[in-house]
Image (cartoon, helix red, strand yellow):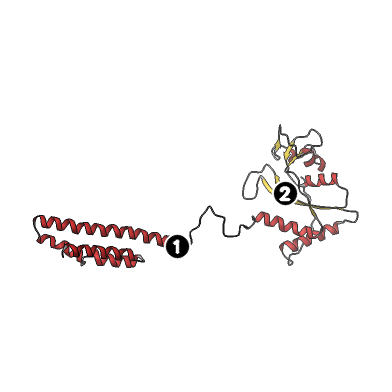
């Protein structure tokens, strides 16, 4: 082949490489123009029959074409691989733009349970009443008639906040602040502010000095209810608990009141 024919072969090969739409087609083109039986390889084999400057010039020209085709194949292979990766990833997303999807996410399981419980008691006429997580010893223990030597009042059971000041939590006297161990403090503050009849439900986090394990946590959630009225009786308590159990767990559940003694 003369010089013009080789240049035409190079041009045709490069065009075919650029026109390939996938890796399978590219492999076919590679075999056609660089395979063992391709025109270019056959021309390289004829170099051994040439001598002197003719062999040198011919070799340079053929190797230049071969290198150009190999570079074009490598570049096209990379481009097709990238194209396949992008296709698998889907439509490109600009992370700086607002999300095209709804921003609402599922609530945390604890939040879902809390809202469900509150909705049940609201249907019974209870009002949600929340309080501070930082409380005082009087509201947490004294107002509930907890004896001065009660185990829960020790620093081994309660997080006392020594040398601490909290402007958002009122004090009865000079008692220390602490992290509330129960939501009963909400009941005390509500009773001191409002006159009966009262129906409140008080959810919230409480804190106790427990070692973390599968059944214990220094921080957990508690919900307490308080109902005060002249006509309120144990029958109301039983009916309220029975209604809650059936609404929360299902109507097939049965409830039973069983007296028990809890020394602490």
Quadrant the C terminus occupies: top right
Q: Residue at x 72, y 58 (%)?
A: 116
First in residue order: circle 2 vs circle 1: 1
Query: Going by the picture, which residue comes out furthest to the front?
Result: 4
Q: Residue at x 75, y 56 (%)?
A: 118
Residue 232 percent location from the top left of the image: 88, 56
Whether residue 256 is visible here, answered yes or no, is no
Quarter of the image for residue 156 reads: top right
Q: Do the numbered discs 2 and 1 sit on residues whose CB atoms are within 8 Å? A: no
The kind of secondary structure element at disc 1 is: helix
Q: How many marks?
A: 2
In-front residue for pair 169/33: 33
Query: Going by the picture, which residue comes out furthest to the right?
Result: 230
Quarter of the image for residue 108 reads: bottom right
In-front residue for pair 147/217: 217
Up the image or down, 195 lies above or below 242; here it is above
Q: Residue at x 82, y 46 (%)?
A: 190
Whether residue 194 is visible here, answered yes or no, is yes
Q: Residues within 10 Å of mark 1 (few under 14, many from 20)?
A: few
The kind of secondary structure element at disc 2 is: strand
Q: Residue at x 90, y 56 (%)?
A: 231
Residue 236 percent location from the top left of the image: 84, 58
Q: Residues within 10 Å of mark 2 (few under 14, many from 20)?
A: some
Spatial separation of the CA atoms under disc 2 and disc 1: 46 Å
Q: Which residue is mark 2?
A: 204
From the viewer's perspective, is 214 left or right of 91?
A: right
Query: Going by the picture, which residue comes out furthest to the top?
Result: 163
Q: Comparing marks 2 and 1, which lies closer to the viewer?
A: 1
Residue 18 percent location from the top left of the image: 32, 63
Residue 52 percent location from the top left of the image: 9, 55
Numbered circle sitting on residue 88: 1
């Amino acid at each position: 082949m003369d010089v013009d024919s080789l240049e035409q072969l190079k041009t045709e090969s490069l065009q075919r490489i650029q026109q390939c739409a996938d890796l399978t087609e590219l492999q076919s083109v590679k075999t056609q123009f660089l395979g063992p039986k391709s025109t270019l390889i056959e021309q390289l084999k004829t170099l051994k029959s040439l001598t002197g400057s003719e062999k040198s010039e011919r070799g340079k020209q053929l190797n230049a074409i071969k290198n150009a085709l190999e570079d074009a194949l490598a570049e096209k292979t990379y481009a097709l691989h990238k194209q396949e990766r992008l296709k698998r990833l889907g439509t490109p997303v600009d992370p700086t733009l607002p999300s095209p999807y709804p921003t609402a996410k599922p609530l945390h399981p604890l939040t879902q349970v809390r809202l469900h419980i509150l909705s049940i008691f609201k249907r019974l006429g209870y009002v949600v009443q929340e309080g501070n997580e930082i409380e005082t010893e009087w509201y947490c223990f004294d107002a509930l008639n907890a004896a001065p030597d009660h185990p829960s009042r020790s620093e081994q059971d309660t997080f006392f906040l020594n040398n601490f000041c909290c402007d958002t939590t009122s004090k009865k006297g000079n008692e220390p602040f602490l992290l509330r161990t129960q939501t009963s403090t909400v009941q005390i503050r509500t009773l001191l502010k409002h006159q009966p009849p009262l129906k409140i439900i008080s959810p919230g986090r409480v804190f106790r000095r427990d070692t973390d394990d599968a059944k214990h946590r220094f921080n957990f959630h508690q919900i307490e209810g308080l109902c005060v009225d002249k006509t309120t009786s144990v029958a109301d308590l039983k009916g309220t608990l029975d209604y809650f159990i059936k609404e929360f767990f299902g109507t097939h559940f049965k409830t039973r009141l069983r007296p028990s003694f809890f020394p602490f």
